[in-house]
Image: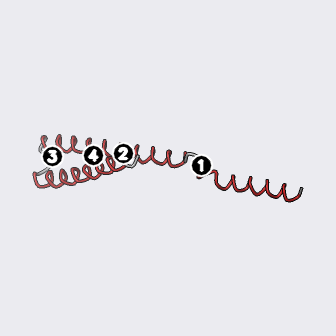
């Protein structure tokens, strides 16, 4: 009788320890949502930055060298964000 109780306790402990393997990982889904949301925000900020930069350039608020340098930085950031979004979508 004692060995049966011990076996049941062992089985329950084993099930408890192995539960994360069989259960869908909700935590990683939450992390993926946050990562995707942050990437979308970064993309929007880059696009808004490029728009503002073009408006400032049209209003002659900066010289061409500064404009080109800032535009290149924003374009590089935008390319990086798009690559990260694509990578994240391919991982799904």
The residue that mark 1 highlights is: 22
Which of marks 1 and 2 precedes in the sequence? 1
Distance of mark 4 from mark 3, alpha carbons? 19 Å
Distance of mark 4 from mark 2, alpha carbons? 20 Å
In this picture, residue 46 sits left or right of residue 32: left
The residue that mark 3 highlights is: 61
User: Of discs 1 and 3, which sits in the foreground?
Assistant: 1
Distance of mark 3 from mark 2, alpha carbons? 39 Å
Q: Position of residue 60 (x, y in %)?
A: 11, 44
* Mark 2 surroundings: few (<14), some (14-19) or many (≥20) residues within 10 A: few
State the SS at label 3.
Answer: loop
Q: Are marks 1 and 3 in contact (CB under 8 Å)?
A: no
* Nearest to the observer: residue 21 or residue 76: 21
State the SS at label 1.
Answer: helix
Rendered residue at 89%/56% (across/down): 1
User: Of discs 4 and 3, which sits in the foreground?
Assistant: 4
Give the colour scheme shown.
secondary structure
Q: Are marks 4 and 3 in contact (CB under 8 Å)?
A: no
The residue that mark 2 highlights is: 89
The residue that mark 4 highlights is: 46
Which of marks 2 and 4 precedes in the sequence? 4
Rendered residue at 84%/55% (across/down): 4
Which of marks 3 and 4 precedes in the sequence? 4
Q: Are marks 4 and 2 in contact (CB under 8 Å)?
A: no
Which of marks 4 and 1 precedes in the sequence? 1
Q: Are marks 1 and 4 in contact (CB under 8 Å)?
A: no
State the SS at label 4.
Answer: helix
* Mark 3 surroundings: few (<14), some (14-19) or many (≥20) residues within 10 A: few
Distance of mark 1 from mark 4, alpha carbons? 40 Å
């Amino acid at each position: 009788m004692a060995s049966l109780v011990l076996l049941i306790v062992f089985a329950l402990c084993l099930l408890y320890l192995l539960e994360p393997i069989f259960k869908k990982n909700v935590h990683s889904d939450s992390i993926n949502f946050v990562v995707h949301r942050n990437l979308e925000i970064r993309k929007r900020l880059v696009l808004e930055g490029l728009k503002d930069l073009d408006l400032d350039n049209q209003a002659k608020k900066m010289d061409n060298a500064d404009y080109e340098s800032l535009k290149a930085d924003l374009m590089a950031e935008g390319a990086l964000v798009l690559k990260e979004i694509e990578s994240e979508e391919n991982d799904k």
